[in-house]
Amino acid sequence: MNVENVLLGIAVHQLFWEHLPHWGRWFNRLLGMLPKPLQALYEQWRCPYCAGFWIGLSVHAATGRWVFDAFAQLPSFWGAAGVPLGWFMDALVFATLCKLGALVVHAIGLPALKGLQAKEIFLAQKAKAN
């Protein structure tokens, strides 16, 4: 399995849908300047599975690497349809792993943030006591 591509896909999803919208107004202003159909696509692709499919196709096209090498060589009876079918199935697996990765990041994120906040409160109270 090509873990690097999957991690890249999760990172791209996190960047565009979890972080950039909160890093200032510039990104949201840029989104607002896009044509309405592209704005609608951005909103509809918030789902890491939906976005993951297209990210998977893009990462595959950019790197030439498959998530699973088995999709690169489908049985010969598929003929000319084998390559696009392989890309499609690879992107579906990529999307599933991207969604799983996003769920894991969210599951870990909340307890980690609560722990960080508790630590900061503890350190602030300790500094105040000294």
Image (spheres, helix red, strand yellow):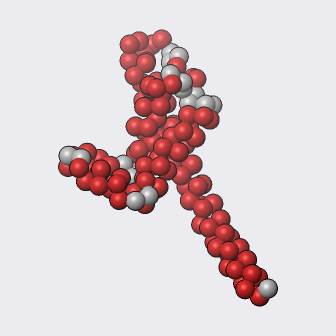
Residue sitting at the far front: 130
Is 57 or 113 nearer to us in this picture?
113
- Residue 12 versus residue 18 in the image, above or below: above
Q: Residue at x 32, y 49 (%)?
A: 42
Q: Residue at x 43, y 49 (%)?
A: 16
Picture coordinates of residue 82, whole percent (x, y)? 43, 18
Is 120 or 106 nearer to us in this picture?
120
Is 49 or 21 nearer to us in this picture?
21
Picture coordinates of residue 126, whole percent (x, y)? 76, 82
- Residue 10 versus residue 77 in the image, above or below: below
Q: Residue at x 20, y 46 (%)?
A: 35
- Quadrant containing the N terminus is top right
Picture coordinates of residue 60, whole percent (x, y)? 48, 27
Corner quadrant of residue 50: top left
Residue sitting at the far bottom: 129
Q: Is residue 28 left or right of residue 102?
A: left
Q: Is residue 69 visible?
A: yes
